[in-house]
Image (tube, rainbow, N blue to C red):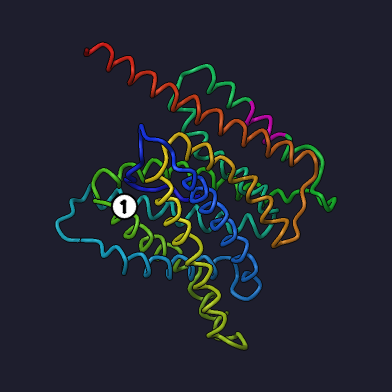
Amino acid sequence: MTQLANPTPATGVTTPPYGAFFAIGGTVVLQTGVACSAKLFPQLGVSGTSWLRLLIAALVLAAVVRPSLSGRTPRQWGSVLLLGVTSAGMTLLFSAAVDRIPLGIAATIEFLGPLSVAIMASRRLVHGLCALLAGAGVALICFVGATGSGQPLDAAGLALAFAAAACWAGYILYTRAVGEVFAGYQGLAVSLGVAALVVTPAGAHGGITGLLDSADPVLLLAAVAGVALLSPVAAFALEMTALRRMPVRTFGILTSLEPAVAALVGLVLLSQSLGWAQLGGLACVVTASAAATWADRTGTHDGQSQREEETR
């Protein structure tokens, strides 16, 4: 789910074999954090858990990055505020979706956000075919069969996942804008603080009340802190490390495995099984995302090679 602002990817170099482990590790850590946060919903509520998670992550990242806030223009503040709002929406809506539908299904639908951004930015035929494949996958998930337990999918949960996908699409666009005006990861640190503030009205009461009503508030707060450190802090660090050791295209293809990883994590940690129709839909979305990423990077590489040849 994490999109890195202003990364420093390795390009034109041989990919170290351990780069893939960092990329996949980031995805596994991210989805594990989400699954663990779901276990806190009964005590803190969805909004309370989301608020505490964002707040702790923002404090940790601010302490590490120490962003500079002086001398910013209104346009720069507007970009980072919009990034914070979409970050808040993405976190809160996805958590609410996971509370109602299996993690693998929620992650698959949410992944339509970045896939849509990639497809809409291109007019190539292959991206149109990827869109059709992803649409077929969503149809299988939403309208055919049931989960592995035989339960139909909750309509409200599906709607929340689609809303989270829209927020993720906006998050990608605003991340690019913030990355152009904030050095390094300062924009990401500030936007997480904004996201925590945005979720405060919805989550502060439930989060604080849940902690105070707990038999062991310190232990519960430590659990929330652990989840926050997993996602997004540790996931962000792993993805950043991967991007600095491998081409962006390879990283994008590996990230396309996120819905499949989410389904596996949901099965192991939350005992959530998917029906054959949902697994087929998940496979369609993963394939569409990987194909779109491969075609996009290949086309970019070919265009760059042609321009270099013309200047010689």
The quarter of the picture where residue 237 lies is: bottom left
- The image shows a total of numbered marks equal to 1
Residue at left offset 22%, top offset 12%: 312
**Which residue sits at x=54%, y=70%?**
48
36 vs 84: above or below: below
Residue type, label 1: Val
Disc 1 crowd, CA 10 A, few/some/many (<14, 14-19, 20+): many
Residue 134 belongs to magenta span:
yes
Q: Nearer the viewer, residue 249 or 246?
A: 246
**Residue at x 58% of width, y 27% of height:** 131
Q: Main secondary structure of the magenta part?
A: helix
Residue position for label 1: 80
Please give the range of residues in magenta.
Answer: 133-139
Percent position of residue 50, x then y: 52, 65
**Residue 144's x, y, as percent?**
79, 37
Where residue 190 appears, as percent x and y from the top left, is 31, 59
In this rendered view, identify the residue nearer to me: 11 or 272. 11
Question: From this viewpoint, which residue is outermost toward the bottom?
Answer: 215
Residue drawn at (30%, 46%), measured in percent from left and top?
179
11 vs 295: above or below: below
Side of 302 relative to 261 (left or right): left
Q: Nearer the viewer, residue 50 or 287?
A: 287
